[in-house]
C-alpha cells in the first residue's frame, strides 16, 4: 500500500510508456548478436574459429540490412511532412534516426565487414586469430552506431566510450609486442584525456543551457546571446579539443602516427577507417546540430585546425619511410579536408564532408589492405621500400594501390578528386578563398609522397630480399581477399567516373536530417 | 554512323581500346591492335573536319547530359573552329607515335601502347569539354599516363623528370580549380559558355587571370615556369616527347583562348603586357639558351619553348593593338598566327623529336658531339632532317613560316619593338637549328659509330614522309585551316574586348 503510493506519487510521475524500439532495431540486433557471438566463441576450438568470423560477418551484414530495411520509412515520411525533417526519435528523444544516420551506419557496417575480410589472413598467420578481435570489433561498431544516432550529449559520450574502450583493447591485442603495448598505452592515456576534455566541455554547456539534449541546447542558444557567453565559449573550446583528439587534427594529432605504426596492421586498418565516420557524425551532432548558433566561434577555430592539419600532415608525411606512418600523417591532412566542409557551415558543405569521409574510409581501407596483402608473419611490409617493383611482382595489386594513391592525392578521375572538389567548393562559396588556396597548395605537397609510392611500385626494380633480409616470396591471398581488394580498387575509379549518385545521397541525407 | 556521338567516340574509343590492350597483355599483339585503334580513331576524327560547318562560331557536334547533378556538372562535349583542328592533330600524331614505338619499345609494349591510347582519348576530352569541371578532370587525368610513360620508358634520370613534370603541372592547375569554383559560386554553373558571361569585378578578374596564367603558362610552357620541359623531354621516350611537344603544349595555348580571354577580358587586357613580356623573353632568351645546348633533345625542347612564345604573343598582342588604334582591326591575324603556329609546331616539333629518336635508336646517345657526317650514311634521313630543320627556322613554304610571319606582322601594329624582338627569332632560331644540322648531318663521318649507321627503314620513312607532307601542305596552302578557325577566333576577339566589369 505504502509502496504503491510512493511509486504512484513521485517516482514515476507519468505513465511509463514502452518506447518505440523500431528505430533502434539494428542496434538492438547487433547487441544481441554480438553477445551470442561472444558466447558461442567460448565453446569453439581454435580450428573452428572460422565460425566466429562467419557469424560476425553475418551480424554486420544483417545489421546493415536492418538499417536499410525500411520499416521506419513510414514514420520518417510522416515526420518529413510534419516538420520538414525526416528524423524520428525514441527512448525519450535520446535516440534519433534520420537519413544521415542511416547512410553513415551503412557505411560503417560495410566498411567494418571489409575490414574483417582484410584482417582475417593477417590475424591467422600471426596466431592472433581469436574471437576477441571480432567481438571487440562488433562492440566498437555498436559504439559507433550509438554515436551516430545519439541525440543527447550523454549518449554521444557513452557511444564514444564504448568505441574507445574496444579500440584500446584491440590496439593492445598483441600483448607480447612492445611496440603495440606502447601504442596502446599512448592511445589510452591521450584518449582518456580527450574524453575528459570533451566531458568537461559538455558539462559546462549543460550547466549553462540546462539540458543535455542537443535540440534543447540549440533552442536555448537561439534565444540567448551565445557569442558573449564566456561559459558557452569555454564549453565550446573544450568540446572542440575533445573532438579534435578523436578526429586526429593538428594540434591534437600526436597519438596518430604512433598508434597507427604500433598497432597490428589489421587494427590500424580498422582504426583508420570506420571510427572516422563516427567521429564525423559526432561533430555533426555536437557542433552543427547542438552548437549551430555558435558557428562563428567554431568556424574560426576549425579553420585554424584544418589549415594546420593539412600543412603539418602533408609536410611531415614526406619525411616518413614507413607506409603506416606516412598514411597516418596523410590521415591527419585528410581530416583537415573533412573539416573544410563543416567550416563552410552550409548544407552543401556538410554533405561534401560526408562524401569526403565515406570515400576516404573506402580508400584508406584499400591502402591498408594492400599492406596486409604484402606482409606475412614476421615481415610487416610496412616500409615504403617494400613497395619496390610491385608492378613487376603483382601488376594487378600495384594497379589497385596506384588507384588508392592517386585518389588520396586527389587526381581525377579517381573519387578522391571529387571529394576534394566538393569540400573546396564549399569553402569557396563561404567566401574563404584563402583556406581553399592553402588546401590546394598542400594537396600538391601531398601529391609528392603519394607519387613516391607509385614511383617505387612502377619505376623501381624489385629487390630480391625484403627489408628483413629474407628472400621475397610472392604474396598470396584467399579468393575473398582478392575479390574485395579488386572491388575496392575499382570502386575508387567507378565512383570517380560517376560520383553523382553518392553525392546526391549525401546531399539528400543532410538536407532531410538537419 | 555515330551521329550525335562523334566526340564521345573520339574520347572513349581510344581509352577503351587502350584498356583492352592493357589487360590483354604483351602476348596478344599489342602493336597491331594499338595501330588499329589509333588508325580507326584518326579516320573517325576526319568526320569532324568533313562535317564541320565553318561559318559561325557556334559549338558543333554538341553532346550534353547531366553528370553530377548536385553541382550542376554536365558531360558536355562540343567543338568549334579552335578545338577541332587540335583534335585532328592529336589523333594524327598518335598514329605516328604508335608506329614510332613499333620496334623500339621492347619493355612492356602493351602498357606503352595502352598509355598512349588512353592519353589520346583524354586529350581529345580536354579539347572537346564544354564544362569546366569536365575540362579539369581531363586536364589532370592526362598527367597520369604521361607520368607513367616518362617514369617507365624514360632515360636515366627519368624519375626526377617525371615527378617534376607531374608536380609542376599539378601545382599550376590547382589554382585554376579554385578560380573555377569561385566563378561557379558567382554563376551557379560550370558550363564554359556560362562562365564566359559571368560578371566579375576587377580584383577577382586579376586573381583569376593569374591563376589561369599559372595553369596554362606551366603547360605552354612560358618562361620562367618552363624548367620542367627540358627535363621531361630529355628523359621521355621518343613517343612521350612527341606527344608532349606536339599536342600537350597546345593545351596551354588553347586554355588562354578558351578560358583567359573570354572569361576575364578586363584582366587580360590589364595584364597583357606581362604575358607579352614573358613571351618575348621566351622567344629571345630561350632562343639563346637553345644555342648552347649539347644535347639534341634539349635543344629542340628549348626551341619548342621559344616557338610557343609566338603562340602566346600572337594571342595577347590583341590588347596593345586595341589600346593603340582603338579598334580590333588587324588583331585577328595575330590570333590566327598563334593558332597556325600551334598546329605547325605540332608537326615540326613532333618531326624533330622523331628524327632525334631515329638517331638515338641507332647510336643510343643524344650528344651532338657524338655525331657528324650522318648524311654520308643516311642520305634519306638527312633530307628529311634538313627539311624539318628549315621548317623549324621558319623557311617560307613550310608551315613554320606561316604562323611566325603572321604574328610578327601583327605585332608591328602594336609596337615596333615587340615586332623587332619577335623577329630576332628568325636569326637566333636559324642559328641554333642550322648549327645543329651542320654538326650532326654534314661534314665528314665523325667516328666509327656514325660510319656503321644504316638509313631509315620503310616504317620510319613513312612516318617522316607524312609529317613532311603536312609541313609543306600547311606551308603552301594554309587557307583551309585559317578558314575553319576564322569565325571562332573573331568571336574570341569580340569576347575579349567586351568588358565584363560588374555594373556595366
Image (cartoon, rainbow, N blue to C red):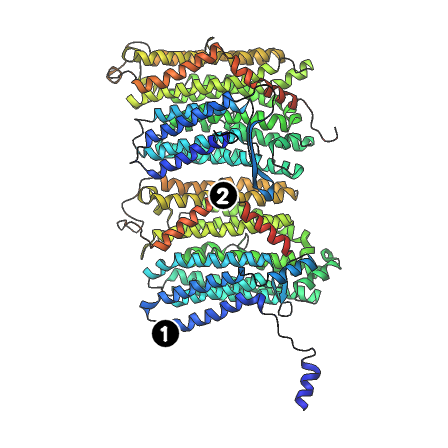
Q: Is residue A339 visible?
A: no
In this rendering, position of residue B365 left or right of residue A364: left
Residue A361 vs A42, above or below: the answer is above
Marking on residue A43: 1
Disc tally is 2
Marking on residue A496: 2
Residue at 43% of width from left, 27% of height from top?
B41
**In the rendering, at what x and y percent does residue A5 appear?**
69, 87
**In the rendering, at what x and y percent does residue A288 appear?**
64, 56
Residue A254 vs B393, above or below: the answer is below
Using a 10 Å C-alpha cutoff, classify the residue at mark 1 as few (fewer than 14 neighbours), some (14 to 19) or many (20 or more).
few
- Quadrant containing the C terminus of chain B is top right
First of labels 1, 2 by sequence position = 1
Task: Identify the subunit bearing mark 1.
Answer: A
**In the rendering, at what x and y percent does residue B46 appear?**
46, 22
Residue at 32% of width from left, 38% of height from top?
B25
Q: Quadrant of residue A241?
A: bottom right
**For numbered disc 2, what is the local secondary structure?**
helix
- The extreme bottom residue here reads A1
Residue B411 vs A153, above or below: the answer is above
Q: Is residue A225 visible?
A: yes
**Mark 1 and mark 2: Cα distance apart in space:** 46 Å
Residue at 46% of width from left, 49% of height from top?
A363
**Which sits in the foreground, A481 or A18?**
A18
Task: Identify the subunit bearing mark 2.
Answer: A
Using a 10 Å C-alpha cutoff, classify the residue at mark 2 as few (fewer than 14 neighbours), some (14 to 19) or many (20 or more).
many
Marking on residue B156: none
Q: Are marks 1 and 2 in contact (CB under 8 Å)?
A: no
**Which sits in the foreground, A227 or A86?**
A86
**In the rendering, at what x and y percent does residue A274 appear?**
49, 57
**For numbered disc 1, what is the local secondary structure?**
loop
Amino acid at each position: 500500500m505504502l509502496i504503491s503510493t510512493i511509486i504512484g506519487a513521485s517516482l514515476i510521475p507519468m505513465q511509463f510508456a514502452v518506447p518505440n524500439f523500431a528505430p533502434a532495431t539494428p542496434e538492438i540486433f547487433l547487441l544481441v548478436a554480438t553477445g551470442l557471438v561472444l558466447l558461442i566463441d567460448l565453446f569453439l576450438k581454435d580450428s573452428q574459429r572460422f565460425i566466429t568470423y562467419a557469424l560476425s560477418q553475418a551480424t554486420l551484414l544483417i545489421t546493415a540490412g536492418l538499417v536499410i530495411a525500411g520499416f521506419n520509412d513510414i514514420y520518417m515520411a510522416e515526420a518529413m511532412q510534419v516538420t520538414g525533417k525526416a528524423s524520428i526519435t525514441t527512448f525519450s528523444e535520446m535516440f534519433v534516426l534520420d537519413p544521415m544516420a542511416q547512410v553513415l551506419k551503412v557505411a560503417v557496417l560495410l566498411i567494418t565487414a571489409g575490414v574483417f575480410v582484410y584482417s582475417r589472413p593477417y590475424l591467422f598467420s600471426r596466431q592472433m586469430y581469436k574471437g576477441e578481435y571480432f567481438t571487440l570489433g562488433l562492440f566498437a561498431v555498436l559504439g559507433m552506431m550509438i554515436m551516430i544516432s545519439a541525440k543527447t550529449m550523454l549518449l554521444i559520450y557513452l557511444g564514444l566510450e564504448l568505441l574507445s574502450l574496444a579500440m584500446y583493447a584491440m590496439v593492445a591485442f598483441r600483448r607480447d609486442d612492445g611496440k603495440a603495448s606502447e601504442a596502446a598505452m599512448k592511445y589510452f592515456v591521450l584518449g582518456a584525456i580527450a574524453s575528459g576534455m570533451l566531458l568537461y566541455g559538455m558539462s559546462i554547456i549543460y550547466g549553462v543551457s540546462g539540458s543535455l539534449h542537443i535540440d534543447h541546447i540549440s533552442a536555448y542558444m537561439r534565444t540567448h546571446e551565445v557569442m558573449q557567453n564566456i561559459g558557452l565559449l569555454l564549453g565550446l573550446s573544450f568540446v572542440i579539443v575533445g573532438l579534435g583528439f578523436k578526429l586526429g587534427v593538428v594540434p591534437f594529432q600526436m597519438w596518430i602516427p604512433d598508434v597507427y605504426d604500433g598497432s597490428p596492421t589489421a587494427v590500424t586498418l580498422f582504426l583508420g577507417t570506420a571510427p572516422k565516420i563516427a567521429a564525423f557524425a559526432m561533430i555533426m551532432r555536437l557542433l552543427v546540430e547542438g552548437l549551430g548558433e555558435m558557428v562563428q566561434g567554431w568556424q574560426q577555430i576549425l579553420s585554424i585546425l584544418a589549415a594546420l592539419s593539412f600543412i603539418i600532415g602533408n609536410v611531415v608525411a614526406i619525411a616518413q619511410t614507413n607506409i603506416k606512418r606516412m598514411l597516418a600523417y596523410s590521415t591527419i591532412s585528410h581530416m583537415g579536408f573533412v573539416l573544410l566542409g563543416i567550416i563552410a557551415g552550409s548544407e552543401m558543405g556538410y554533405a561534401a564532408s560526408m562524401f569526403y569521409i565515406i570515400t576516404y574510409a573506402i580508400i584508406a581501407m584499400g591502402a591498408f589492405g594492400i599492406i596486409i596483402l604484402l606482409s606475412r608473419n614476421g615481415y610487416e611490409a610496412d616500409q615504403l621500400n617494400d613497395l619496390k617493383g610491385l608492378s613487376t611482382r603483382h601488376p594487378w595489386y600495384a594497379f589497385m594501390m596506384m588507384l588508392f594513391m592517386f585518389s588520396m592525392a586527389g587526381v581525377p578521375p579517381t573519387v578522391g578528386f571529387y571529394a576534394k572538389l566538393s569540400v573546396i567548393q564549399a569553402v569557396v562559396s563561404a567566401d574563404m578563398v584563402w583556406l581553399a588556396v592553402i588546401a590546394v597548395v598542400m594537396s600538391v605537397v601531398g601529391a609528392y609522397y603519394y607519387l613516391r609510392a607509385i614511383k617505387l611500385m612502377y619505376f623501381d626494380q624489385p629487390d630480391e630480399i625484403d627489408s628483413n633480409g629474407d628472400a621475397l616470396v610472392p604474396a598470396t591471398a584467399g579468393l575473398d581477399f582478392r575479390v574485395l581488394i579488386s572491388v575496392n580498387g575499382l570502386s575508387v575509379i567507378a565512383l570517380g567516373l560517376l560520383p553523382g549518385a553518392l553525392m546526391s545521397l549525401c546531399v539528400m541525407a543532410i538536407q532531410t536530417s538537419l | 554512323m555515330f551521329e550525335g556521338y562523334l566526340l564521345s567516340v573520339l574520347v572513349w574509343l581510344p581509352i577503351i581500346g587502350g584498356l583492352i590492350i592493357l589487360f590483354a597483355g604483351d602476348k596478344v599483339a599489342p602493336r597491331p591492335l594499338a595501330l588499329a585503334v589509333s588508325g580507326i580513331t584518326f579516320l573517325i576524327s576526319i568526320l569532324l573536319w568533313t562535317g564541320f560547318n565553318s561559318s559561325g562560331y557556334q559549338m558543333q557536334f554538341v553532346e550534353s547530359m547531366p553528370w553530377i547533378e548536385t553541382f550542376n556538372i554536365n558531360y558536355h562535349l562540343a567543338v568549334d573552329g579552335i578545338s577541332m583542328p587540335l583534335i585532328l592533330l592529336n589523333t594524327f600524331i598518335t598514329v605516328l607515335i604508335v608506329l614510332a614505338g613499333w620496334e623500339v619499345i621492347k619493355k612492356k609494349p602493351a602498357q606503352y601502347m595502352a598509355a598512349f591510347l588512353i592519353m589520346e582519348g583524354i586529350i581529345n576530352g580536354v579539347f572537346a569539354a564544354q564544362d569546366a569541371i569536365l575540362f579539369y578532370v581531363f586536364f589532370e587525368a592526362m598527367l597520369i599516363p604521361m607520368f607513367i610513360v616518362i617514369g617507365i620508358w624514360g632515360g636515366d634520370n627519368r624519375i626526377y623528370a617525371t615527378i617534376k613534370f607531374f608536380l609542376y603541372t599539378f601545382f599550376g592547375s590547382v589554382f585554376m580549380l579554385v578560380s573555377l569554383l569561385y566563378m561557379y559560386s558567382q554563376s551557379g554553373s560550370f558550363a564554359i559558355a556560362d562562365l564566359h558571361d559571368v560578371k566579375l569585378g576587377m580584383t577577382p578578374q586579376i586573381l583569376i587571370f593569374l591563376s589561369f596564367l599559372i595553369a596554362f603558362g606551366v603547360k605552354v610552357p612560358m618562361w620562367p615556369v618552363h624548367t620542367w620541359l627540358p627535363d621531361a623531354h630529355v628523359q621521355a621516350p621518343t613517343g612521350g616527347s612527341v606527344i608532349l611537344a606536339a599536342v600537350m603544349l597546345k593545351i596551354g595555348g588553347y586554355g588562354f583562348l578558351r578560358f583567359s580571354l573570354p572569361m576575364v577580358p578586363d584582366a587580360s587586357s590589364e595584364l597583357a603586357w606581362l604575358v607579352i613580356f614573358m613571351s618575348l623573353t621566351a622567344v629571345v632568351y630561350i632562343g639563346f639558351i637553345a644555342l648552347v645546348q649539347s644535347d639534341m633533345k634539349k635543344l629542340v625542347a628549348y626551341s619548342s619553348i621559344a616557338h610557343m612564345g609566338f603562340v602566346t604573343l600572337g594571342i595577347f598582342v590583341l590588347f596593345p593593338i586595341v589600346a593603340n588604334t582603338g579598334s580590333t582591326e588587324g588583331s585577328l591575324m595575330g590570333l590566327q598566327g598563334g593558332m597556325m603556329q600551334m598546329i605547325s609546331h605540332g608537326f615540326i616539333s613532333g618531326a624533330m623529336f622523331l628524327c632525334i629518336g631515329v638517331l638515338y635508336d641507332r647510336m643510343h646517345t643524344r650528344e651532338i658531339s657524338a655525331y657528324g657526317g650522318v648524311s654520308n650514311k643516311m642520305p634519306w634521313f638527312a633530307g628529311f632532317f634538313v627539311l624539318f630543320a628549315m621548317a623549324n627556322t621558319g623557311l617560307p613554304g613550310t608551315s613554320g613560316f606561316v604562323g611566325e610571319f603572321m604574328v610578327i606582322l601583327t605585332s608591328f601594329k602594336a609596337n615596333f619593338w615587340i615586332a623587332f624582338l619577335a623577329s630576332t627569332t628568325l636569326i637566333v632560331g636559324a642559328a641554333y637549328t642550322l648549327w645543329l644540322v651542320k654538326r650532326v648531318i654534314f661534314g665528314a663521318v665523325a667516328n666509327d659509330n656514325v660510319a656503321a649507321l644504316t638509313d631509315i627503314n620503310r616504317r620510319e620513312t613513312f612516318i617522316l614522309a607524312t609529317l613532311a607532307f603536312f609541313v609543306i601542305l600547311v606551308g603552301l596552302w594554309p587557307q583551309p585551316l585559317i578558314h575553319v578557325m576564322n569565325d571562332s577566333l573573331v568571336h574570341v576577339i569580340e569576347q575579349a574586348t567586351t568588358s565584363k566589369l560588374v555594373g556595366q
